[in-house]
Image (cartoon, grey):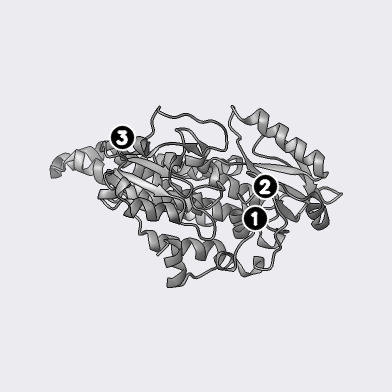
Amino acid sequence: MRNMKRFSSLFLASALGLTLLAGCGSASDDSAAGQSAEAEDVSVSETEETSESETEAEEAADVEEAEETVTVEDLEPDEDGNITITDMAGREVTFKANPTIWNSSPTAEGWLCAIVPDQIIGWAAEFEDEALAYYPESVSDLETIGGNYGDSTANEENILAVSPDVIINTYDCTEDGLAATVASADETAEEYGIPVICLSRDIADSAECAANIGLWFGAAQRGYDVSVYLQGLLDQVTEAAEAAVAAADVPTYYYAEQTDGLFTEAVGSMHAAVFEFCGLENCVGDDISMSGMGGLEEVTLEQVVQWDPEYIFVWMQPAYQDITTSDEWSGITAVQNGDVYQIPLMPQNWFDRSPNSLRVLGCLYCASIVYPDYVNYDLTETVSEYFSYMYGVELTEEQLAAIYCD
């Protein structure tokens, strides 16, 4: 993330400067220090360890203070009131400053609600009132105008009627997917006559997406602050996963999709991105492969029994009920140990369908379950803080219970 990296470099440069200053001294100073140490029989190793520890603590404090005081300025529009940016697919896009925005699939709406809620022009997918209560009150009356995702196609008349200034969506911005992404975004822009902006759909790029949304849409400071917050959450997941890997304590999982739980995702599927970010081992291994971007590979119960996953994550309630109560699933390790979990769905699916911005929460949720000995956060406290910081919503006990499908 270009801007974030620049800020981080400034912090590191500052910390490095402090380190160098702390290490400077004359030859006579060194000699005197050595004589004093010898006379007092001070342990050099102990002194060095204490000094290093103090220096690291000072550097961490200086970096933290720098982060808290960073000021980020919005982009200046040109004489026509437009700005030009380079999106995350490398495309140059020009649009009206402080634009109205349509997310053409329900993927980036969580970031938009946290950073520029008043600029969202409508929902791609319909939200129930119960789900909307998790988002800012200012978006509660937005209309559903449709979107282009999965099997859904937006009504062009609806889009042109609300006339957004920009269209935004998440795409595959990796080297392998870039050509198709650029072609798709350009085609959409030509179809509607509206600028299209590409965000990366990679979970690891979540913080960069937030920073870019703020910078591009006239809320640079808020976008930066949100990006720092999100990166801190993801770093906690990464630390837990790395500790589990180092301890050779990484379990297998099965992702049970659809009402019978007998559809799943192959290794490398974008629909299994939360599990892969958390470093889990997909029990299907090489036994199945991706048939297309839509995923949902059909399997048999006999295969799942043979794979014998240690954890099962379920998308739909009927499948959860069947897996946890029927004799057919009862011999699987995950079922025997009570390690079958229904994925949180409020206000959107935390894992997938769509692969949206709440997957950061999905990673926190998943890691807290599979790495209980390695996480250093309380999930419920973190989730409550998330909705408070991101959306200004103080969750009730009932809302928290609904998240966990209790």
- Separation of residues labelled 3 and 2 (CA atoms): 36 Å
Query: Where, quadrant-wise, is the C terminus in this rendering?
Result: bottom left
Amino acid marked by disc 3: Gln
Q: Quadrant of residue 185?
A: top right
Image point 36% across, 35% down: which residue? 303
Image point 35% across, 59% down: which residue? 378
Residue position marked by numbered label 2 in the rendering = 152
Residue position marked by numbered label 3 in the rendering = 306
Question: For the residue labelled by badge 3, is the local secondary structure a helix, a strand or a loop?
Answer: helix
State the count of labels.
3
Q: Residues within 10 Å of mark 3 (few under 14, many from 20)?
A: few
Q: Earlier in the sequence, mark 3 or mark 2?
A: 2
Image point 68% across, 68% down: which residue? 141
Q: Nearer the viewer, residue 357 or 84?
A: 357
Cβ atoms at labels 2 and 1 below 8 Å apart = yes
Residue position marked by numbered label 1 in the rendering = 125
- Viewer-side label of 1, 3: 3
Residue 151 screen position, x and y as percent:
65, 44
Q: Earlier in the sequence, mark 1 or mark 3?
A: 1
The numbered dot on residue 391 is none
Q: Earlier in the sequence, mark 2 or mark 1?
A: 1
- Separation of residues labelled 1 and 3 (CA atoms): 38 Å
Q: Residues within 10 Å of mark 2 (few under 14, many from 20)?
A: few
Question: For the residue labelled by badge 1, is the local secondary structure a helix, a strand or a loop?
Answer: loop
Residue 201 screen position, x and y as percent:
57, 41
Q: Is residue 185 visible?
A: yes
Question: For the residue labelled by badge 2, is the local secondary structure a helix, a strand or a loop?
Answer: loop
Q: Is residue 60 visible?
A: no
Q: Nearer the viewer, residue 64 or 350?
A: 350
